[in-house]
Amino acid sequence: MKKLLFAAMMLVMLKGNAQNDAISKFFAKYQDDETFTQVKVSQKMFGLFTNMTVDKPEDKDILDAISKIQGLRVLAKNETRDGRTLYKEAIASIPTKDYEELMSVRDKDKDMKFFIKELSSGKIGELVMVSGGNNEFMMLSIFGEIDLKKIGNIGKKMSIDGLDKLEKIKDKKN
């Protein structure tokens, strides 16, 4: 019985790690390229935020949303000539059988797409945003248990370009 339980736990862990394997490969491809800016935030860091005290109820909602995030990764390149090429490559790396396109935005010379991966419980397990233009590129991955409206609110309060657009999305259940 213990072996069966251990095997089941390993399978769940492997499935969790494989959920963003293609995206991880894209990040890994450019991890040693010094022309890219890379940011990785661990679950521990998000956990530290949840120890903060807040006065406003909306800030409590934000801390609640943050507590469910397991990690965040950003890969960005500014003042580049290959922003559109990187955008197309990043979009092609996202497995369409696992990720659903949620929204796309075109603004002057910049394209932006949002993808989600749903968990078996129907909740969102990963949000991927890819943005590319004539002179810039960015790919962002947030994983854990994600509430799009709360993440959009966080993006708006922190002035994170692109994430602020998420608060306009209606819940899939409504």
Image: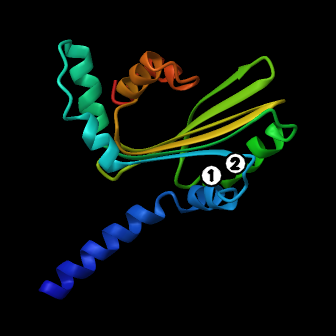
Three-letter residue code for mark 1: Ile
Local crowd at mark 2 within 10 Å, few (<14), some, or many (≥20)? many
Residue at (79%, 17%) from the top-left corner? 108
Screen quadrant of the N terminus: bottom left
**Total labels drawn:** 2
Q: Is 121 or 69 nearer to us in this picture?
A: 69
Name the residue rendered at 62%, 52% in the picture.
Answer: 94
Relative to 49, is 143 above or below?
below
Residue 119 on image: x %, y %: 36, 50
Q: Which residue is mark 1?
A: 94
Residue 158 in percent (x, y) is at 45, 20
Locate residue 77: give its quadrant.
Answer: top right
Is 152 on the left-hand or right-hand side of 57?
A: right
Residue drawn 33% across and 49% down?
A: 43
Report x, y in % for residue 73. Answer: 51, 46
Q: Amino acid at mark 2?
A: Ala
The residue pinned by badge 2 equals 90
Q: Nearer the viewer, residue 96 or 156?
A: 156
Check whether the beta carbons of the residues at disc 2 and disc 1 lie within 8 A of each other.
Answer: yes
Foreground: 64 or 106?
Answer: 64
Tell which tag, 2 or 1, sits nearer the viewer.
Answer: 2
Label at residue 33: none
Name the outermost residue toward the top: 56
